[in-house]
Structures are given as C-alpha cells and as structure tokens.
Amino acid sequence: MSSSTGTTHKPVYLAVYDTLADWEPGHATAQLARAGYRIRTVGPTREPVTTVGGLRIQPDLALADVRPSDAALLVLPGADLWDAGDDLAPFARTARAFLDAGVPVAAICGATAGLAREGLLDSRNHTSAVSFYLAATGYGGGERYVEADAVTDGGLVTAGPTEPVAFAREILRLLKVYDDEAVDAWYRLFHDSDAEAYAVLEKAGVL
C-alpha cells in the first residue's frame, strides 16, 4: 500500500524553465501527486516559462525563495538550456544546497550535466544519456558512471532522457511512496506493459 496513507508530506519541488523536456518528469510527478504529495513548480523567477513542447507554465515559486527544509524532493528535468550556457547553473547550486541539507534531488537528461559541472557527481554513482556526454563537461566523476537505466546514490537520482519510467521508479523507492513489490509492479506495468502487474497494483491500492 502507499506509505502516504494518512500522512502529510512536504511538497515536491519541480524545477521548470524554458525548453524543459516535457516527457521526463511526468511519470514521477503524476504518481507522487496521486500518492498525496503536492507538486510545486519552481522557475528562475515567477515569470512564465515555455517547455520544448510549447506548454506555458506559471511557476509557483522563484528559485530564490526555495529552501531545502520546505521540500521533500527537488526534481530537475532536462532542457536545452542546460547545455546552452550558464542560465540554469543556479538550479545546480540549489541542488547542492538540498543534498548538503539531506534533502534528495532527482536529475534527468541535461540536468545531470548541470550537476556534473557543479561537482555533484564526482563522488556519487550516477548515469545519464551516455558517458561521453558527461565527460564533455570536464567533470571528475567518470569512474562513477554506471551503465543503467537510472541510479540512486547519496540521495541523488540520475537518469537519461529515454528513461522517464525508471527515473520515476527510483524516486518512488527513494521516498518510500510504495513498498518494493508495488514499485516493481508499477515499473513493469508502465515500462514493460506487463498485464500481470496490474493486479498487483490493484491489490496494493496503487491504481
């Protein structure tokens, strides 16, 4: 069953910025919201941003107003801007503040490169799109790169752009949203279209 039943959680902060990759955080945020977490969007400012898919998002908060103590998790989706300059570097610095405070962070696709530049992958096992993508940042964590769909280490989840379901799986495990059997079944249903997993989730009250 969901570990959120009858409990109150701190919100999950979802970073939003221009060129955000729409498909990457959706499985995670949808399942977290269904499990009782409030999703609050955090932009560079309170000004609207536009995703790569053309969706316009009005952030709930500006990054300057974010405090790790107020959140259960910071989610950093990919975006073209991660590799186009330093515009999103403040989000990587905020990720450092979260991890230093013991609050988990989940980064996918281009956001992993931003964290690499910030030095946050040098001492943690991690993954991304491909190893040479991160190597191009000049970071010092190449020996910690793992060929996997998603990796969790030291309170940090990383994944590549083709693995939004595995990304969500790691987040659900990290926050203990469901027990291991339910998380595994959820992954098998949404990643593998395993019809048998549906009955497990229905029994657990997840669907």
Image (tube, rainbow, N blue to C red):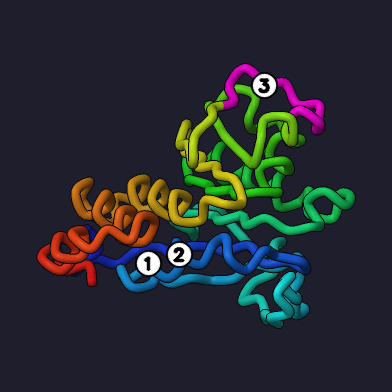
Is disc 1 in contact with disc 3, using a CB cutoff of under 8 Å?
Answer: no
Task: Give SS at disc 1.
Answer: helix
- Residue interval drawn in magenta: 135-145
Q: CA distance from mark 1 to mark 3?
A: 32 Å
Residue at (65, 49) in percent of width and height: 109
Mark 3: amino acid: Gly
Q: Which mark is residue 142?
A: 3
Number of numbered discs overlaid on the protein picture: 3
Instruction: Report if residue 138 lies within the magenta region.
Output: yes
Q: Nearer the viewer, residue 151 or 177?
A: 151
Mark 1: amino acid: Gln
Q: Which mark is residue 31?
A: 1
Q: Nearer the viewer, residue 1 or 203?
A: 203
Mark 2: amino acid: His
Binning the other alpha carbons within 10 Å of mark 2 as few (below 14), some (14 to 19) or many (20 upward) gives some
Task: Give SS at disc 2.
Answer: helix
Q: Nearer the viewer, residue 188 or 60?
A: 188
Residue 4 spot, x, y in % from top left: 25, 63
Q: CA distance from mark 1 to mark 2?
A: 6 Å
Is disc 1 in contact with disc 2, using a CB cutoff of under 8 Å?
Answer: yes
Instruction: Report if residue 179 lies within the magenta region.
Output: no
Quadrant hosting residue 63: bottom right
Is 60 on the left or on the right of 105, as rendered? right
Residue 86 spot, x, y in % from top left: 86, 49
Residue 60 spot, x, y in % from top left: 61, 76
Residue that numbered label 2 is attached to: 27
Residue 48 spot, x, y in % from top left: 75, 80
Majority secondary structure of the magenta segment? loop
Is 109 on the left or on the right of 70, as rendered? right
Quadrant hosting residue 158: top right
